[in-house]
Amino acid sequence: MPRKKKTAIKGSDPAYTSDFSQPLPTNKPVVEETPKPVVSKPEPAPEKSPAPKPTPKPTVKTEITKPKQPPAKPAPAAKPNSEPQVQGSGDKREIALSAAVKMDQQKQLDALEAQGTPAKVAITMAGRRAVEQFEPQPEYVEKQDVQRMPMRQGYKSTKRIDASLLDALRNKHDPHRLSSDSAMMRGQFEPLFWTCLDAVIKELNSKD
């Protein structure tokens, strides 16, 4: 029986080898693994330090203190006015009152001084009485034409008189304001002083 001829293998197959230490080839398709993308983790944001809380300002309550009102006092009872009322606004004006000593009165004063009573004492006493008794009148009185001693030997004082009365006299008898308030009253005051001086001289003579 004729022997079959061996099939001659021509060429070489790199998949086959005679080295059995190498792994046997397989017909499975080789799947290449796709590298996974590396996802970088976001770096944590730096922690912000908390802002300091504002310190609350202490609230100061302003206390409004109301002024204490004093208790209302009852109105004082009106006092009866014993002084004579002069028609006018009620405003007073302080004026100078002056009076000279008459020549005949000076002779009587010299006699008093000879007895030990200074003339100045009699003149001062008479002047104070005249000021207390003097009540100005709205009628103007002219200065009397009599012989007088110098004014340095006379009497001078002051008194508060109704201003409207003075103004009325000045408007009528001195519209240009050439005279003083004292001059407007001298015609009324001087005769009263002479009367008081005569009375004082008589009283001082009776004591001797």
Image (spheres, grey):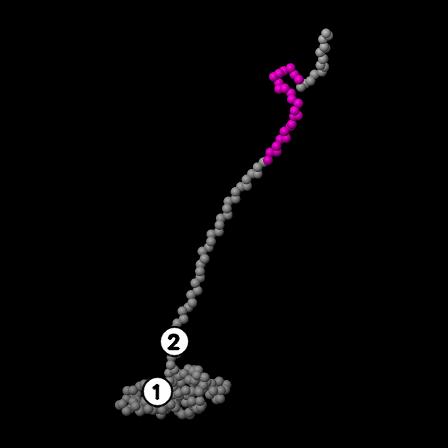
The residue that appears at 65% across and 16% down in the rendered structure is 17
Question: Would residue 127 appear left or right of 8 to someone viewing this image?
Answer: left
Residue under pointer 1: 129
Q: Nearer the viewer, residue 69 or 150?
A: 69
How far is mark 2 from mark 1, CA to CA? 40 Å
Residue 186 visible in the snapshot: no
**Amino acid type of the residue tagged 1 in the rendering:** Arg
Residue 25 visible in the snapshot: yes
Q: Is residue 119 above or below residue 34?
A: below
Q: Main secondary structure of the magenta part?
A: loop
Is disc 1 placed on a helix, strand or loop?
Answer: helix
Q: Nearer the viewer, residue 30 or 175?
A: 30
The residue that appears at 62% across and 18% down in the rendered structure is 22
Label drawn at residue 73: 2
Q: Which residues are magenta?
A: 16-39
Instruction: Name the spot of residue 35 as percent of width and height, x first.
Output: 62, 31
Question: Would residue 101 appear left or right of 33 to someone viewing this image?
Answer: left
Task: Please report whichever mark, 2 or 1, sits nearer to the chain's N-terminal start.
Answer: 2
Residue with the most extreme front position: 1
Instruction: Name the spot of residue 140 as percent of width and height, x first.
Output: 45, 90
Instruction: Name the spot of residue 63 as percent of width and height, x first.
Output: 43, 63
Q: Is residue 54 above or below residue 80?
A: above
Is disc 2 placed on a helix, strand or loop?
Answer: loop
- Asked which quadrant contains residue 151, the reply is bottom left
Quadrant in which the C terminus appears:
bottom left
Whether residue 22 is in magenta: the answer is yes
Instruction: Name the spot of residue 55 as percent of width and height, x first.
Output: 47, 52
